[in-house]
Amino acid sequence: MGEQRIQALTRKILLKISPPGNGDIVGDQERIQSALTPDFGTVRFSPRLLKKVYPLCREANWEITLTLLKNGRAWELVELESGDQRDAHFGLAVDLGSTSVAMKMVDLNTGKVLGEESILNHQIQYGDDILSRIFYAKNKPDHLIAVQEATLGTFNALLSRLETATGISAEKSCIMVVSGNTTMIHFLLGIDPWPIFEYPFAPVFNHTGYLDARDLGLNTSGYLYCMPSVANYLGGDTVSGLLVAGLHEKDELGLFIDIGTNGEMVLGNKHFLVAGAGAAGPALEGGISKNGMKATAGAVDSVIISENELRLTTIGGHRPRGICGSGIVDLIAQMLLSGWIDFSGRFNPEKSSRIVIRDGEYGVLYASREESGNGQELLFTQSDMSQFIDTKAAASTMVAYLLERLGVEPIDVDRLYVSGAFGTYINLESAITIGLYPDLPRERFVSLGNSSLQGAYVLLTDDQKMEEVTRLQERIEYLEFGAATDFISRMYAARFLPHTDFDLYPTVKAALRKQGRFR
């Protein structure tokens, strides 16, 4: 038995057409069009493909494979090939992140993932964070072109890697679905994203429609489709995440959270969807500490303090070179439970010899020069702690504000979907201990992994989802967190670990009581 065929965004069909002859002088395009009309109606030919008709059809003895795409109500011709090429039907799903970009090559006959690659976004050379890149490109067309070319260069590097890994030419891919935040999609198309960050915060566009990949400078054929954005901070990556989580299809109340440099969240079910988003900061990706690092080899990714002794693990089992987001969350949670820090995050130096003073401030020495992999002291300082707590406070306040606006208590949330790399690798208990997530029964949490990439794959391999994507984009009601007059005072309350209101965190209170830290 062969593998089951799917209904992807593109269709590949074989046509065997009667050639022109004596008295039959119908044009080549019309001849193809006539064969397509019964099933597809009028199909649009681009000038590029019209040029390809001759001599291809005659050389193929009028046995040709056509790749078609439904664009709205009409069908468009994406590619024209000689002979039967139906088995070679490939597409690409892409997560365009501000830090890294991931790409999958997919067999669009079966849905099988043939290869997956990810690399750092080449845009980083113009700024570590999105805002730096936006200021770099603002009102400077040559700088904007440079950022766009860096983005396209990232895509083409991934295409080259996939080509090497799979042995399939990138030119054979006829459709690419890209999922990313609103700013990233503006940069991809070479459009200045400044309006996103200037009142009234309206993007230049939310929908791209289908675009010709070659016109953009991508080393692949066919079309490109970007997941639509909802608002300035709520992009196509969130729409992708909802497609995977399926909040909009269920009776139960769901909360979707993706916390990275930005925090995006959606609350709702099949009856309503309300969303909010805002800047969270680089802390959750290890980007605040002098010794902070991405989740790569040698990064501290988990910490336990037992009987006042600190033990850690690193990615790849190497000697530590720094600490990533999941390691930071563990470290803070463990220090809180063990009394190394108080509820405001201040260090208690009498609790451990690992709490030291360097350059006039306290910090925890989680790896000495002898213990580290680079011969340097690895510290998490009071300044690092303060920045992290600010980020944690922003994220948890966004969740609390969204729930309160809808008159919902945290316990009313039936399912909490956590998306993104940070949400995938973080220790759930540690995240709840420091107040990053609500204190809900643990079985209610669902880790989605990279739902931005997964959502792009879902749409790529199921053309019925296009209608769903459009409905999602239209249905979501967007709350502007910046318009909340008491947002800053709420954030201050959330700057404590886990929160100033301990009743919101009963399991954390119980754990602290067990450690003798709470009466």
Image: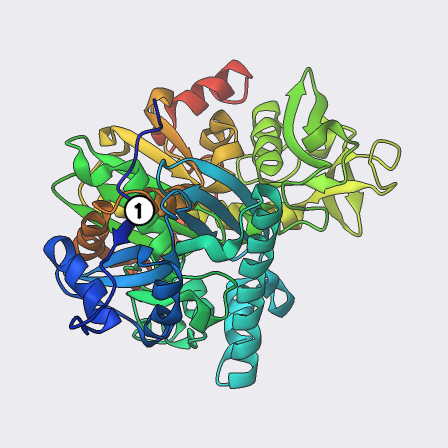
Q: Mark 1 points at which residue?
A: 459
Residue 143: image quadrant is bottom right
Q: In this view, does 167 lie above or below 22?
A: above
Colouring: rainbow
Which of 71 and 265 lies nearest the eye of the viewer?
Answer: 71
Name the element at disc 1: helix
Residue for point 64% across, 45% down: 294
Residue for point 29% across, 74% down: 200
Q: Is residue 479 above or below residue 367?
A: below
Q: How many labels does the image show?
A: 1
Q: Position of residue 428 (x, y in %)?
A: 47, 28
Callout 1 crowding tier (Cα within 10 Å): few <14, some 14–19, many ≥20: many
Residue 56: image quadrant is bottom left
Which of 62 and 473 lies nearest the eye of the viewer?
Answer: 62
Q: Position of residue 494 (x, y in %)?
A: 42, 44
* In the image, farthest residue toward the front: 22
Is 232 placed left or right of 285 in the picture?
left
Residue 344: image quadrant is top right
- Visible in this render: residue 398? no
Q: In this view, does 379 lie above or below 1?
A: below
Is 167 placed left or right of 111 in the picture?
right
Q: Quadrant of the N terminus?
A: top left
- Visible in this render: residue 78? yes
Label 1 sits on what residue type? Leu
Q: Where is residue 343 in the image (x, y as percent from the top left)?
A: 53, 35
Residue for point 29% across, 45% down: 8
Is 92 placed left or right of 336 in the picture?
left
Which of 72 and 265 lies nearest the eye of the viewer?
Answer: 72
Which of 431 and 45 lies nearest the eye of the viewer?
Answer: 45
